Each structure stands twice: as C-alpha cells, then as structure tokens.
Image (cartoon, grey):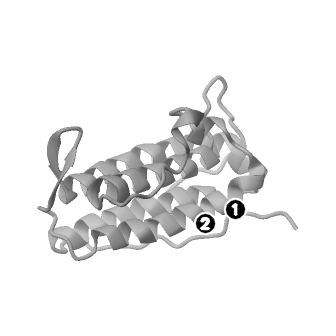
Amino acid sequence: MTWRAPAVERPAGSLTAPERSLLQGYLDFYRTTLLFKCAGLTASQLAERPSPPSNLSLLGLIRHLTKVERIWFRIHFAADPAEPVFPLELGKDADFELIDPADAEAAYNGLIEEWKLSDEAAAGHSLDERFTFKDTESTLRMIYIHLIGEYARHCGHADLVREQLDGTTGA
C-alpha cells in the first residue's frame, strides 16, 4: 500500500479573539493549510519538483517548516538544546535539496510533532516575553507574527506546486 498524505480539517478560528488566541488561531490555520495542500498526494508526488530549476517541492516545504518551527520556538525562544532538524554540515538548503519520497510520511508526522513541541515551548509565556536573537532583543509576539508570514508565503508556494502536480486549485 502506498502512503498518501491524509485529509485535514482546517480550524475556522475567531476574528475577534484576544491577541494570543488570534495569533495562535492564524498560525494553526496556516499550519493546517500547508497539509491541506498535500492531502491525497503520494510520497512520490510530495517529493516531486514540478518547476525546474527550482528545488521547491511540497515535501521540501514540510521539512523547511519543521526546521523553522524548531529554530524559532524551541531553540531561540525556549533556549532548548534541541538538535537542528538538519545537521549544519548538510548545508542551509538540506530541507529542500535532500529529498527522498521514502521519508515523506516521517517528515509529515515530524512536522505535526514539532507543532506540538512549539506550542508547548510557548505555553504559559507572555507575548511580551523577551529573548535574544543575534544580539537583538525580540519577543514571543514577533515569533508568532514571523511564523504566520512564513507559513502564508509558503502556502502560496504550495498552491502553485499542487496545481502543477495535478491541477488542484483553491482554498
């Protein structure tokens, strides 16, 4: 049996919630939107790069956003000694370059697990809580805003890749 990315249901979220809930709601919406764009595709389709010479694939986006979640929430904000998702010696683009369909299911599940760990790292902390990133003070609020933008941008990429793979468009 060939593994396929499962169907996902995206949360509706509130448009009037307090700031923390609003930011978490938007982040969760974009997180699941990425997986929504992958739903029903095989591991091979997720690994396909339909726009040469671009190295962009849906699997690469899954791997990239796993890396981004870990870096911002766990490594920078929580000062968690978590290992990078990809060892530095593999290069900064390992998430997009070193693609193997055999790893698709594990990468997909790894992203979902990283979401849980990211949410745990942020739980109970004020949006105004500060941390230092590259010798500059920042806040948890900035991480939420940055990640929402990161996911939104990459969901747009996912739209284009999915359309090129099988013609599926929309939401």
Q: Tell me: 171 left or right of 165.
A: left
Residue bearing mark 2: 109
**Label 1 crowd bin: few (<14), some (14–19), many (20+), radius 10 Å:** some
Residue 109, placed above or below residue 152: below
Q: Secondary structure at mark 2?
A: helix
- Tell which of 151 and 166 is nearer to you: 151
The number of callouts visible is 2
Residue bearing mark 1: 105
Residue 121, placed above or below residue 74: below
* Residue 26 appearing in the image: yes
Q: Tell me: 148 left or right of 11.
A: left
* Residue 15 appearing in the image: no
Q: Residue furthest right?
A: 1
The reply to whether callout 2 and callout 1 are in contact (CB within 8 Å) is yes
Q: Secondary structure at mark 1?
A: helix
Q: Amino acid at mark 1?
A: Glu
Image coords of residue 114 (percent x, y) = 48, 64
- Tell which of 150 and 121 is nearer to you: 121
